[in-house]
Amino acid sequence: METATALRRWPWLKHPFPLLLYLEWVLLGIATLTALPTPFPGRRPRLRRTLEGGWGGEHLPLGVFLCIAALGILGLRLSSQRSQTQKILFTALGFGLSWLTILWGGQRGNSFPALLLVVVVRACLLFPWKGRLVTATLAFGSFVLRLLLGLRRFLDPDLARPERMPRNLSPEQVQGAVFNLTLNSALLFGLVLVFVLMMVSAILTERQSRDRLSLAHEKLRRYALLIENQATLQERNRIAREIHDSVGHSLTAQSIQLENVALWLSEDRQRAGEHLQKARRLGKEALQNVRQSVATLRQPPLQGQSFRDAIQKLMQEFERTTGIQTAIHLPATQQLPTEIAIALYRIVQEAMTNVAKHSQATEVSLTLTQSSTALELIMEDNGRGFDPTQNTTGFGLQSMRERAEALGGSFDLTSQPGRGCRLHLNIPQGGFR
């Protein structure tokens, strides 16, 4: 968001991370301030109107300012999409401009550390961790080399300037103090490098994680819509198939029975009556199947009710329409999340539909138990049963199993011919809390 806003305001700005660009500008500003000449001690500073006059009688380091400006302009065109060779040349140019500030600034190399930090910050954007560590090592080596060049003036008698030596200290003491100062400066710059490297890397990692999370969230949203549409399509196909197989079959058979009634009505009224009774029974079956299909299409299935009330109403409707006796054991469970309650309702609904269509049962029981670790649902009937190994492709069983697995639970079906059917659903604690 921040990058997009910056690019809209300044189309010429080609920087992948404006926040780090602002950090570079701060470092470049510090480098510019440290490159300004300082007034001589004991003299009143005055600003000359020409570059030759400088500040307090010293010349302004125009070349240093040009190097700082060139380094700042390069940062405006920073891009992580460059080739590896271009990235290396870009970093080498940054080091080169930093060293030019020393060559053109003479003894005033105070801006050198800030420029090295700018190069390291840019390397964090251009390279992975290996390249960042190499760049930080080169920056630290450059700083140490700069310190050694400055230390050489004190250690070499030919380059030392006696008038600048403290008169109350011996040359050995001065050299020791300068050496300690040099060592402390190197350690301090090293710590600053580590801090900058870790800080910038952490910022980049956080941004990358946020971008990946946003991308994953968008993919998950699209997948959720796709799965929802797929589930809706499968549910519609299932209902259409059930209506075709059940209602269509019943109405076709009823039509045949009515034709037989018309055929035998004038010749054998008793036989015609038998066909009429069959036609009535088939009509009731078709009506029952239509009611079950309509009940399945209700949205939402719970209709604002609690899970307990919805299941009780479903079982009562099932007993009224099928004549199969039901036994319900529902303890006072805690309020279940809506998605969990809907999934359980659909599983029970599908199981009751299978009982009504295939089991030829006279009794069915439903037991729900809830503990601190799991939620268990058990359904049993006294129907004719079947061999589960011979019924592995049923859409209803597959749908119930998929719903249970989506909750992180397990689905188990036990049945034998002539011994009814038992359905066991187990959902762990994390699936419904």
Image: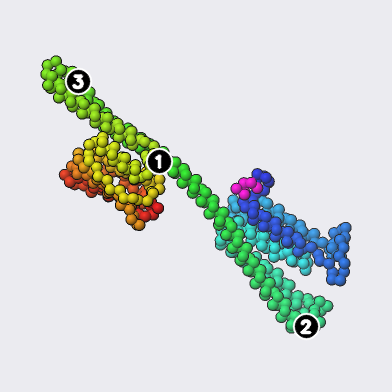
When asked about the image quadrant of residue 94, the answer is bottom right
Q: Give the crowd class for mark 2: few <14, some 14-19, many >=20 residues within 10 Å.
A: few
Q: Secondary structure at mark 3?
A: helix
Residue 284 % position (x, y): 24, 29
Residue at point 71% right, 53% down?
73
Residue 304: mark in rendering? 1
Q: Residue furthest top?
A: 266
Of the image marks 2 and 1, the number of the one nearer the N terminus: 2
Q: Is residue 329 visible?
A: yes
Q: Position of residue 10 (x, y in %)?
A: 68, 46
How far from the left and from the top, in percent, is residue 393? 27, 42
Residue 283's place in the image compared with 102, above or below, is above
The number of numbered discs placed on residues in the rendered structure image is 3
Which amino acid type is marked by label 2? Leu
Drawn side of residue 69 relative to residue 225, left or right: right
Q: Nearer the viewer, residue 417 or 305?
A: 305
Q: Residue furthest front?
A: 332
